[in-house]
Image (cartoon, rainbow, N blue to C red):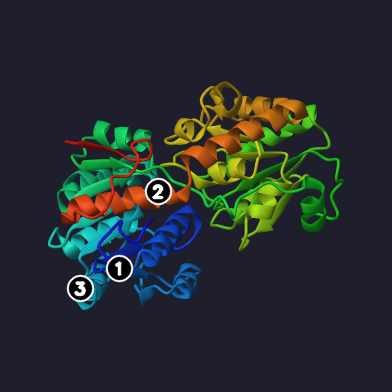
């Protein structure tokens, strides 16, 4: 984002819960770009890995005690957030994900220009009565969001089908080209997994260990993969509430790397990166893997098709919740190194041309400019910014 993209006097307040994973990465990238542009940037978030990283960038970070999901503490969380908003006095509030979107819109109630970015819809994450309540809230809460930013056209379409009335912008997620790049597989793998046969085909899954990311589905597929590729190894990179349950299901060929500060070496070490999510907005892991020149297999959830280069879906896209099909795709690619290399090259070219985080930041600046009535920001390229007004 350039110095002229948004009036440097603009005071932006980002609200986020969660403080890890892809949402935290998106917030970090936006904050870095906005600080570089000269904006006054404050972030309200709970304690966790995100706060010190943002302070290191020069952001004003305010502690906001909040659980990850709605619960009996919501009223006090909204009150605390309202005090933060009053103290900061922002020109614009940008709320990320379902929980911060809920508390933020209740705290502000449209009195300040508000951007809501769901990063996957709350009603997709739950079932039954809880899903119905979440959907009812999203329909009601839309009146307190001046703009709704979706990370994929599919995420926006899901919201429209659900009856959510918003002023929509689609801003695809992006990656830092300088950070995600190919490397010598043998060297990286030897450093990360010295005990593993360097010739063993390696599958890597990066993501929070939780129901959304579908690692349990991958483990159900893994026995079938091993029957076709007996030496294959699988590494689950990340931590989360399902770690104990996943460990009990995992055979010896599955390794748990835990939470890591840098996922790049794991992508670089992989022969294949798999993300078997049940739902998404647009996952960052496949973009990051492709930027590292690695082929991917992903489930056909929101944002997945838009992440892939044109024509790659038949090789890389599987239906969600189907271990048998997932196993077949993974085994086929592990047995075809030339195809993996070709897919990796195509994926990297696509991500660098279409999902550069600089384009993402510029598109968000365009949303801010439109909302605040500024005249100084250039219009972001149409291939990175799409707006549809209802």
CA–CA distance between discs 3 and 1? 24 Å
From the image, state whether disc 2 or disc 3 is nearer to you: 2
Residue situated in front as seen by the camera: 47 or 171: 171
Residue 329 on image: x %, y %: 65, 26
| Residue linked to disc 1 | 73
Residue 302 on image: x %, y %: 42, 35
Residue 36 on image: x %, y %: 40, 65
Look at the image and tell me whether residue 247 can be seen: no
Q: Which quadrant would the C terminus be assigned to in this image?
A: top left
Secondary structure category for the residue under label 2: helix
| Residue linked to disc 2 | 360
Residue 236 vertical position relative to residue 79 in the rendered view, above or below: above
Q: Earlier in the sequence, mark 2 or mark 3?
A: 3
Q: Residue at x 30, y 68 (%)?
A: 73
From the image, state whether disc 3 or disc 1 is nearer to you: 3
- Number of other residues with Cα within 10 Å of mark 3, as a class: few under 14, some 14 to 19, many 20 or more: some
Q: Is residue 267 left or right of residue 233?
A: left
Q: Residue at x 79, y 29 (%)?
A: 227
Secondary structure category for the residue under label 1: loop
Residue situated in front as seen by the camera: 27 or 163: 27
Residue 150 vertical position relative to residue 82 in the rendered view, above or below: above
Q: Residue at x 48, y 46 (%)?
A: 356
Q: Residue at x 44, y 41 (%)?
A: 282
Q: Is residue 122 left or right of residue 200?
A: left
CA–CA distance between discs 1 and 2? 34 Å
CA–CA distance between discs 2 and 3? 26 Å
| Residue linked to disc 3 | 89
Look at the image and tell me whether residue 284 can be seen: yes
Secondary structure category for the residue under label 3: loop
Q: Is residue 327 left or right of residue 208?
A: right
Q: What number is the disc on residue 334?
A: none
Q: Earlier in the sequence, mark 1 or mark 2?
A: 1
């Amino acid at each position: 984002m350039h110095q002229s993209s948004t009036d440097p006097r603009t005071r932006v307040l980002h609200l986020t819960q969660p403080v890890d994973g892809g949402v935290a990465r998106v917030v970090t990238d936006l904050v870095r770009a906005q600080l570089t542009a000269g904006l006054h940037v404050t972030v309200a978030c709970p304690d966790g890995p995100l706060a010190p990283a943002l302070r290191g960038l020069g952001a004003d970070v305010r502690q906001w005690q909040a659980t990850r999901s709605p619960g009996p503490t919501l009223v006090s969380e909204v009150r605390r957030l309202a005090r933060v908003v009053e103290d900061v006095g922002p020109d614009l509030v940008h709320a990320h994900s379902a929980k911060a979107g809920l508390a933020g819109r209740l705290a502000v109630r449209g009195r300040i220009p508000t951007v809501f970015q769901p990063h996957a819809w709350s009603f997709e994450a739950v079932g039954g009565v809880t899903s119905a309540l979440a959907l009812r809230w999203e329909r009601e809460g839309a009146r307190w969001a001046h703009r709704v930013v979706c990370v994929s056209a599919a995420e926006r379409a899901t919201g429209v089908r659900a009856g959510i009335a918003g002023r929509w912008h689609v801003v695809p997620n992006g990656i830092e080209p300088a950070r995600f790049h190919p490397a010598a597989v043998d060297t990286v793998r030897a450093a990360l997994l010295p005990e593993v046969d360097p010739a063993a085909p390696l599958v890597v899954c990066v993501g929070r260990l939780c129901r959304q990311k579908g690692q349990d589905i991958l483990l159900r597929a893994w026995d079938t993969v091993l029957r076709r590729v007996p030496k294959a190894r699988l590494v689950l990179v990340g931590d989360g509430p399902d770690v104990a349950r996943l460990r009990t299901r995992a055979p010896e060929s599955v390794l748990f790397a835990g939470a890591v500060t840098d996922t790049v070496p794991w992508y670089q070490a992989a022969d294949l990166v798999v993300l078997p999510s049940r739902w998404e907005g647009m996952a960052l892991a496949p973009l990051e893997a492709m930027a590292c020149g690695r082929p991917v297999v992903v489930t056909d959830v929101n944002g997945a098709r838009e992440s892939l280069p044109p024509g790659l879906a038949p090789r890389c896209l599987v239906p969600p919740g189907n271990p048998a099909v997932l196993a077949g795709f993974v085994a086929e690619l592990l047995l075809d190194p030339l195809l993996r290399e070709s897919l990796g090259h195509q994926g990297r070219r696509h991500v660098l041309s279409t999902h550069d985080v600089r384009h993402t930041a510029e598109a968000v600046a365009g949303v801010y400019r439109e909302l605040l009535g500024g005249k100084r920001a250039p219009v972001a390229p149409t291939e990175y910014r799409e707006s549809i007004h209802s």
